[in-house]
Structures are given as structure tokens and as C-alpha cells.
């Protein structure tokens, strides 16, 4: 083999490995070890809210809070809802996320410093997918807290026409 072919082959392998590393790392959150005293700790003020009675024309909003009571940065990723009729914005570190829904795919990452909090703004708009009766919608958020790798926030309502 000629030296040009060998060099081309080596460069191709290096580029391919770089692409695999970048694509493979998107959206992942490295979880701290549970016995690490310096780990992040996600603490939610509440995880369930009942909007009560509402019609399909109403739009309701609830803001939940996540406080990092640990000693290292809490990372928030992979935000999603259980229905497109509910959507969510997360504000962490003073930065508001894009809109997340059931099918949202995003490389967004929120960072919550120790002692700081993030806000999880959940909006329920039943007209997007009209229903009647008791409903429950769930927001999930992945974290690097080993004891709370997935946080769930629920809103419920009694919906009528």
C-alpha cells in the first residue's frame, strides 16, 4: 500500500471515531455515584397539581420548582410530556429552554448550581387534543442525581366541553 492510502485510511478512522463520539454523547447525562458526598441532589417542592374543573377552551399553567440541595451541578435533560396537549418550559441558570412536548427532541441541557433552583412551567391546553373527563398529564425530566434520575411532574383536571 502506498503511504497516501495508509494516511487516508487513518484520517478516515479518526474522523469516524470523532463523529461517533459527538453523536453518541448528545443528550446524555452522566450520573454521579450514589455514595459521592459531593453529588447533586434534586429536590422538588411538589410533583402533583390539580387544575380542578376546566373546559376544552381553557388553558391552565402550573410552575413547579426543582432545587439542587447537593454539592455539585444538577443537570437537566430529555424533557418530555405525555401528550402534545401539555407543553413545558424549563428555566435553569437564568436561561429558558425551548418548548418541550410529547415528541420534542432536543440537545438542550439545563444546569442548576448547588443551592439554586429551576422552574418547570407546565401548560395544559386541552383544545389541542379535546377530551372529556378526568385527565392526567406527566412531564418527565432526566437528571444526573443518582437517587432521582427521572423526575415526574403531574397535572390533572376534570375536563368538559
Image (cartoon, rainbow, N blue to C red):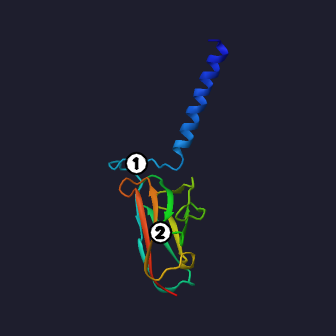
- Tell me the tag on residue 91: none
- Tell me the tag on residue 32: 1
Q: Quadrant of the N terminus?
A: top right
Residue at image coords 41%, 71%: 47
Q: Residues within 10 Å of mark 2 (few under 14, many from 20)?
A: some
> Position of 36 compared to 59: left or right?
left
Q: Where 32 falls versus 45 (above or below)?
A: above
For the residues labelled 1 and 2, the Cα–Cα distance comes to: 21 Å
Q: Which residue lies furthest to the right in this view?
A: 4
Asked if residue 77 can be seen in this view, the reply is yes
> Position of 146 compared to 4: left or right?
left
Q: How crowded is mark 1: few (under 14 residues within 10 Å), some or many (20 or more)?
A: many
* Residues under numbered marks 1 and 2 in contact, where contact means CB atoms less than 8 Å apart: no
- The residue nearer to you, when weighing 151 against 69, is 151
Residue at image coords 56%, 80%: 59
Q: What element carries label 2?
A: strand
Q: Percent x, y for residue 141?
A: 46, 60
**Numbered marks: total:** 2
Q: Percent x, y for residue 41?
A: 40, 58
Q: Percent x, y for residue 158?
A: 44, 84
Residue at image coords 51%, 68%: 120
Q: Where 22 falls versus 54 (above or below)?
A: above
Q: Percent x, y for residue 43?
A: 40, 64
Q: What element carries label 1?
A: loop
- The residue nearer to you, when weighing 62 against 7, is 7
Q: Earlier in the sequence, mark 1 or mark 2?
A: 1
- The residue nearer to you, when weighing 2 against 150, is 2
Residue designated by label 2: 65
Residue at image coords 56%, 42%: 23
Asked if residue 69 can be seen in this view, the reply is no
Amino acid at each position: 500500500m502506498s503511504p497516501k492510502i495508509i494516511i487516508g485510511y487513518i484520517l478516515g478512522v479518526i474522523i469516524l471515531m470523532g463523529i461517533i463520539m459527538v453523536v453518541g454523547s448528545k443528550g446524555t447525562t452522566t450520573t454521579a455515584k450514589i455514595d459521592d458526598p459531593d453529588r447533586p441532589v434534586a429536590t422538588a417542592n411538589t410533583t402533583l397539581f390539580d387544575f380542578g374543573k376546566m373546559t376544552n377552551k381553557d388553558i391552565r399553567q402550573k410552575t413547579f420548582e426543582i432545587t439542587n440541595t447537593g454539592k455539585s451541578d444538577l443537570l437537566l435533560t430529555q424533557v418530555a410530556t405525555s401528550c402534545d396537549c401539555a407543553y413545558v418550559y424549563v428555566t435553569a441558570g437564568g436561561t429558558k429552554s425551548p418548548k418541550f412536548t410529547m415528541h420534542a427532541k432536543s440537545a438542550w441541557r439545563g444546569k442548576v448550581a448547588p443551592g439554586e433552583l429551576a422552574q418547570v412551567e407546565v401548560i395544559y391546553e386541552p383544545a389541542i387534543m379535546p377530551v372529556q373527563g378526568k385527565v392526567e398529564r406527566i412531564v418527565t425530566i432526566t437528571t444526573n442525581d443518582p437517587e432521582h434520575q427521572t423526575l415526574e411532574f403531574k397535572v390533572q383536571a376534570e375536563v368538559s366541553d
